[in-house]
Structures are given as C-alpha cells and as structure tokens.
Image (tube, rainbow, N blue to C red):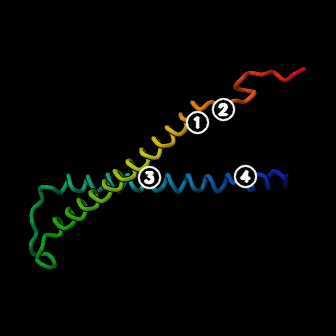
Amino acid sequence: MRCEAMSVSANGTGKRSAVRLTALAVCVLFNAAMLLSSSYISTHADHTHDHGGPGGGCATCMHIQAAESLLKQLSAAVVTVAVVSGGLSGTFFSLKTRASLSGFLTLVTLKVRLNN
C-alpha cells in the first residue's frame, strides 16, 4: 500500500492535475470576463445620462469605456497568443515532417525479425 502511494506522488500526477485545474480556471475566468463585458456594453448602450454624478461625468459611460478597453486588451492578448501558438505548432510540424522524411532506419522500420 505504501509503495503505491509513493509511486503516485513520484509520478507527478497530482501536480499535473493541479496545473490542468489552474489552466481550466484561468480559461473560465477569461471567458466570463469577455462575456460579462460584452453583455454590459450591449445592455447599457442606450442609457439615460446622469451628469450629476461624482466629478460631473456619467458613471455608466465611464463603465462602458472601461469594459470596451478591457475587451480591446483581451482581444489583443488572444490574437497574440493565437499567432505565437500557430507559429510554434507550424514550426514543430515542419520539423516533425523533416525528421520523418529523413528516414530513421531502425530494425522496426525495416521490419527485421530477430527471433532465431
């Protein structure tokens, strides 16, 4: 029983699942921020102006501007990540096809049987 517990912790499955859960949480929060910002902008686009608020400006207009700037920043981050990951995957794919075309000759690829 003790050996099994040590092999699980030595395997790193707990750490791997924690990283996956963290990545999932970041994705969920990212999508929630995008969705909530978009819905706020769409629901408050035609609001009545309250210029008597603090500082003499319309608080709703300020929130809409903040939500629009958040969406611009997040969309810029999404585009950057998409370009970088697309470039990396294209590079890895081209390296993989070159390696497969260079012809690594092993006994398995040559289908040599070694049972005498």
Which comes before the other along the chain, label 2 or label 4?
4
* Image position of 12 (left or right of 25): right
Mark 4 belongs to which amino acid? Asn
Label 4: few (<14), some (14–19) or many (≥20) C-alpha neighbours in 10 Å:
few
Q: Earlier in the sequence, mark 3 or mark 4?
A: 4
Q: Where, quadrant-wise, is the C terminus in this rendering?
A: top right
The answer to whether mark 1 and mark 4 are in CB contact below 8 A is no
The residue wearing badge 3 is 27
Q: Is tag 3's residue or tag 2's residue first in the polypeptide sequence?
A: 3
Among numbered discs 1 and 4, the one appearing first in the sequence: 4
| Disc 4: which residue | 11
Q: Identity of the amino acid at label 1?
A: Ala
- Amino acid, disc 2: Phe
| Residue under label 1 | 99
Corner quadrant of residue 48: bottom left
Q: CA distance from mark 2 to mark 1?
A: 8 Å
Q: Position of residue 13 (x, y in %)?
A: 67, 51
Sequence-wise, which precedes: disc 3 or disc 1? Answer: 3
Mark 4 element type: helix
Q: In the current view of this chain or complex, which residue is farthest to the right?
A: 116
> What residue is shown with label 2?
104
Picture disc at residue 111:
none
Residue furthest front in the image: 102
Mark 1 or 4: the one toward you: 1
Q: Secondary structure at mark 2?
A: loop
**Separation of disc 3 and disc 2 at Cα?**
40 Å
Q: Secondary structure at mark 1?
A: helix
Q: Earlier in the sequence, mark 2 or mark 1?
A: 1
Q: Type of residue at label 3?
A: Cys
Residue in the image at 10% along x and 75% along y: 52
Looking at the rendered image, the disc whose residue lies closer to the viewer, 3 or 4, is 4
